[in-house]
């Protein structure tokens, strides 16, 4: 009985993961557009923007009753991953 409940929940999680992948693809496409607009590698990291995003995520997490330590960790890692992606794909000098 418990195993069936877990399996149903895992199926829902798998479906949600599929949706998250679609969102990550859309975010990646937007980051590609941003890379083209940046002139220098030094423009990749914008600390003010990062702090703004993290504050907004924390506030929205609290409002939605999500533990901010979870969402902030996810966003910080996502930001790091996209910064690496930008450096790797930056073509200008």
Image: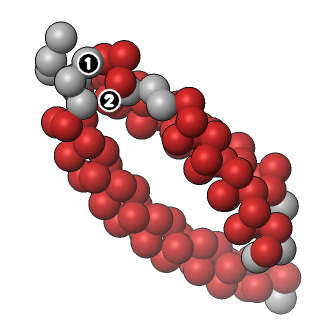
Q: Quadrant of the C terminus?
A: top left
Q: Secondary structure at mark 2?
A: helix
Residue 58 location (% of width, % of height): 75, 57
> In the figure, residue 13 lies in which quadrant?
bottom right
What residue is rendered at 76% in x and 76% in y?
64
Task: State the residue in front, 67 or 44.
Answer: 44
Provide residue 55's location: percent of width, then percent of height: 70, 51
Q: Which residue does the image show at 80% across and 56% down from the upper left?
A: 68
Q: Is residue 44 above or below residue 49?
A: above
Tell me where residue 28 appears, x and y as whole percent: 31, 49
The residue under label 1 is: 40
Residue placed at 17% from the left, 36% from the top?
36
Identify the secondary structure beneath mark 1: loop
Instruction: Name the side, left or right, on which 74 lies relative to 17.
Output: right
Up/down of 7 relative to 71, above or below: below
Q: Residue furthest front?
A: 48
Label 1: how many Cα within 10 Å (few below 14, some 14–19, many 20+): few
């Amino acid at each position: 009985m418990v195993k069936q409940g877990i399996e149903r929940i895992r199926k829902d999680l798998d479906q949600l993961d599929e949706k998250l992948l679609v969102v990550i693809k859309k975010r990646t496409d937007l980051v590609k557009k941003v890379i083209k607009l940046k002139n220098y590698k030094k423009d990749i990291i914008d600390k003010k923007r990062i702090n703004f995003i993290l504050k907004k995520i924390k506030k929205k997490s609290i409002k939605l009753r999500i533990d901010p330590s979870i969402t902030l960790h996810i966003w910080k890692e996502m930001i790091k991953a996209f910064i690496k992606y930008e450096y790797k794909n930056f073509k200008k000098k």
